[in-house]
Image (spheres, grey):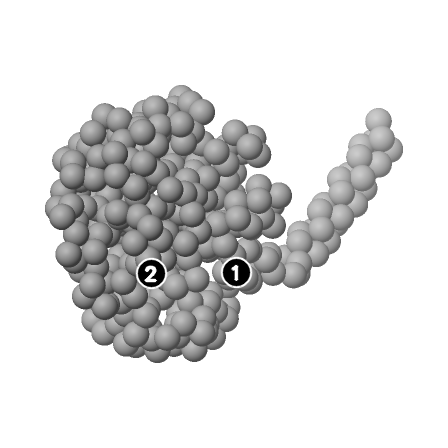
Amino acid sequence: MKKRFRILLVGLAAALTVAAALTATSSARPKTVINVGIDIPFYPMFDYIKALNGKDYFKGKPYTVNFDVLDATTQVPAFGKGDLDVMTTVPSFMPRVMDTYHLKVQYFYPLARWTVGPQLLVKSSSPYKTLADLKGKTVAIQPLKTRFGAEEAAIEAATGQNIRTYFKLKETDAAPQELALGRADAAFIEAPATYPLLATKKFKAIYSVHDAFLKGIGDPAVMNGGFIARSSFIKDNPQFIHDLVAAFADAWSKYQKNPHTINSVASKESGIPEAQLAAVGTILNLVKMSPAQKKVTQRDVQTWQKLFPLLEKSGFIQKVPANIPSLFVITK
């Protein structure tokens, strides 16, 4: 009996030694690599943080971060395959991501809101003054399959009708040019595509997604582009999620004090002229965004509970998510 007990003690000691060795090995592992993607190459805070990555933000952290600028056609597949841990998208795209890649995802930080959003532009001399004036008229728009559903949901919210039948819709990659050349009565476009047209003073905006959502849903600042990640990633990486949000909150605060401090760095990083970044920041309302609007709130959840049915009705998504509140991480 005593001999057997001694053997057990020796075995336990050996097991503890192995466990200690494994723990030491674990603590010496290389840093975790986290990949964050965006499909908006002209978003100034992202380019700013990307430029300072490793020098200021995320310095000395137990992980390294890669910031990638993709486009709307490559970002979602990269996320679906697992090449990206975090990406930016509009909540409207979450059902598509979940259905296509069988993932559970959550939205945890807003980067913009539809305080203007896509706008209906006409020539300054146009007789069309209102949304109703354009019913049945030729409206150029980027192919809806490349969009995020804002225009579709907006027309459903404002008129109760499908955008494809409300307008004589002309889907094209050259929507601004179609308006400029007189081949369309209006163009339904957003920044930065609106910038060169409005700058000439020969065109004007007569309606926006913001106008539609304010009228149809009662929300003056609908949350759109922001960060999403797999639910499991958010659960397993709380420190990184906290650090990422803190980094963008800090950069945003600096931007609101003096946009040039951010835009000058972002311009060098992205190659986009600083003047254009400044214009985009104005159109996205980045300077005037309130502290409350930089958070995910219960009101945002309630708004999207109204928007998802409109997106289903318009055909943008196949079905409304079963548990919409679970798709959002409320900011504490």
Identify the residue shown where x is 46% and y is 54%.
39
* Residue 310 spot, x, y in % from top left: 30, 27
Above/below status of 284 relative to 304: below
Above/below status of 220 relative to 163: below
Identify the residue shown where x is 30% and y is 74%.
275
**Picture quarter containing residue 179?**
bottom left
Residue named by callout 1:
68
Q: Which amino acid does label 1 sit on?
A: Asp
Horizontal side, residue 61 vs residue 259: left or right: right
Count of numbered circles in the view: 2
Residue named by callout 2:
192
* Residue 158 spot, x, y in % from top left: 19, 32
Above/below status of 151 relative to 46: above
Mark in the foreground, 2 or 1: 2
Q: What residue type is labelled 2?
A: Pro
The local secondary structure at tag 2 comes to loop
